[in-house]
Amino acid sequence: MKPILFIDFDGTLCRDRFWRSFEQNNSEKIQTAFRANKSKISDWMRGSYTSEEINNLISKETNIPFDNLWQVFVADCKSMRIDSEALNRIQNLRKYYHAILVTDNMDCFSRFTVPALNLDKYFDSIINSFNIKKRKDDNGGELFMQLANKFNSKIEYCILADDSKKTCGIFSKLGGESCLVRLEKPLSYWLEKIGNEKRN
């Protein structure tokens, strides 16, 4: 029986933003419109909207032509920067753990980011809230329990690395070990720590 190493994406494995390649003026307009539609963004993560629909909404609110917006959006999704050291550490830890990328994310993640960055190569499974219509925090973190059962793992031996204090709190309450990712304690810090504990 292998336990599971759960890894979050946004803010944990990657810090890049959508539409980051626009010049500053347009970038600020886009981010303002994005933040102003918080409930729609949340629904997007649950599969209620597509990337095209959200880009269309942002286009109308910023007066940036849809085609320009879409082109940059897709390119930026495909070129998100990931800590290669962290990926190598995850690969090494797969001797001891099932590595599962579990993310509250959008269709663009599965459509553009995963294939462009070959993320399938580094994880035994990739779970995106858009595809399963469920977020990590739903129903007291039941997704983590479902995945532990699916992989025949005991939650008390599983580890989560996530930048969300709330999600880490929920995971700890389930009995698992949480690693709260911060600038001063990035993912690579926690992965090195986990690796050292396994080797000792």
Image (spheres, grey):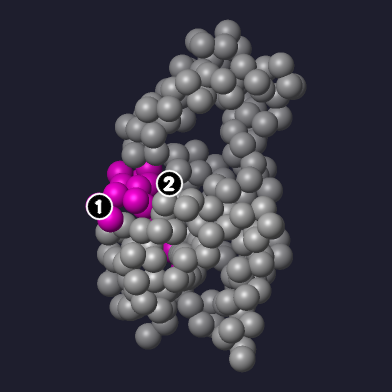
Residue 176, how many percent across, how many down?
A: 39, 71
For disc 2, the neighbor class at 10 Å (few under 14, some 14 to 19, many from 20) is: many
Q: Amino acid at mark 1?
A: Asn
Q: Is the residue 67 above or below the residue 127 in the image?
A: above
Q: CA distance from mark 2 to mark 1?
A: 14 Å
Quadrant holding the C terminus: bottom right
The reply to whether the C-beta atoms of the residues labelled 2 and 1 are less than 8 Å apart is no
What residue lies at 73% left-to-right and 21% top-to-bottom? Answer: 24
- The residue under label 2 is 104
User: Splitting the image into 4 quarters, where does residue 149 fall?
Assistant: bottom left
Residue 4, how many percent across, how many down?
A: 43, 73
The numbered mark at residue 168 is: none
- The residue under label 1 is 139
Q: Is residue 56 left or right of residue 22?
A: left
Q: Which residues are magenta?
A: 124-140
Residue 52 in view: no
Tell us which disc is closer to us: 2 or 1: 1
Q: Is the residue 98 above or below the residue 198 in the image?
A: above
